[in-house]
Image (tube, grey):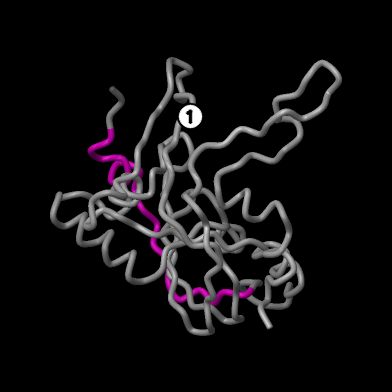
Amino acid sequence: MFANDREFHQPTSRLWAMGVDTRAENAVTDTRGNVLLHAQTGGMISPQRYELPRNTQLYRFASGSAPIPRAITGGWWVAEPEFEKLTRFAQVHDLHVAMAARYLCCVPPEWSDMGLLMRVRVEKPLLAYRGLGNSVVVPKSDGLGHVRMEPNNDIAARRLHQLFIPGLQEYAAKTPEQVVPGALALERYWKLESADTQRGWFYL
């Protein structure tokens, strides 16, 4: 039995994994208010069902201002082999590992300062979506143009599978008695300097 089985099988969970914004207020509608389409950017290509057994080690970058109990319930993660690929890429190119993740996972500063890195262990078996990253187009924070990021899926050393785990917030709400509620056990976390997480980033 998986802790997030119900949430994983909701129709919207795969859409979220694909970067689809399903919020009604952001949908494109006709003059009668009927939804024509939802915006899509980022996410992953062709998400596949992926099982995360107990004791699987995962890593996540989150906003530096996010409290740990909230950050640990976020949906986007990478497994240990992918994190090792990030560290190798960072070493080869003299980058901070957060900047390597920003580049290989297509995470513009407009989405996150990536000021928090967490390492966790799966405590309750989970279901995730696994797939390669998709391209990102978002408005710049200054409102002048757009940020465009393309994944490097055609280069083996830069091809990175990501994980999207739906239902972590819902499960955490069921376990408020825990020090860090939820299906994941926090092993360690690091606070990162924004100067490091954005060193090497520039707008064209």
> For the C terminus, which image quadrant?
top left
- Residue at 23% in and 38% down: 200
Residue 30 image point, x, y percent: 78, 20
Closer-to-camera residue (26/65) = 26
Please identify the residue farthest to the right as the structure is shown: 32
Circle 1 crowding by C-alpha within 10 Å: few under 14, some 14–19, many from 20: some
Q: How many marks?
A: 1
The residue tagged 1 is 138
Q: In the image, 188: left or right of 28?
A: left
Secondary structure of the residue carrying tag 1 is: strand
Q: Is residue 71 above or below residue 16?
A: below
Residue 128 image point, x, y percent: 56, 66
Q: Quarter-wise, where is residue 49 in the image?
A: bottom right
Q: Which span of residues is magenta-colored?
A: 183-201
- Residue at 34% in and 57% down: 160
Residue 17 image point, x, y percent: 57, 52
- Residue at 66% in and 72% down: 181
Q: Quarter-wise, where is residue 11 in the image?
A: bottom right
Magenta run includes residue 90: no
Q: Is residue 168 above or below residue 125?
A: above
Residue 93 image point, x, y percent: 15, 49
> For the N terminus, which image quadrant?
bottom right
- Residue at 24% in and 61% down: 87
Q: In the image, 185: left or right of 83?
A: right
Q: In the image, 62: left or right of 17?
A: left
Q: In the image, 132: left or right of 175?
A: left
Disc 1 marks which amino acid? Val
Q: Is residue 101 above or below residue 171?
A: above
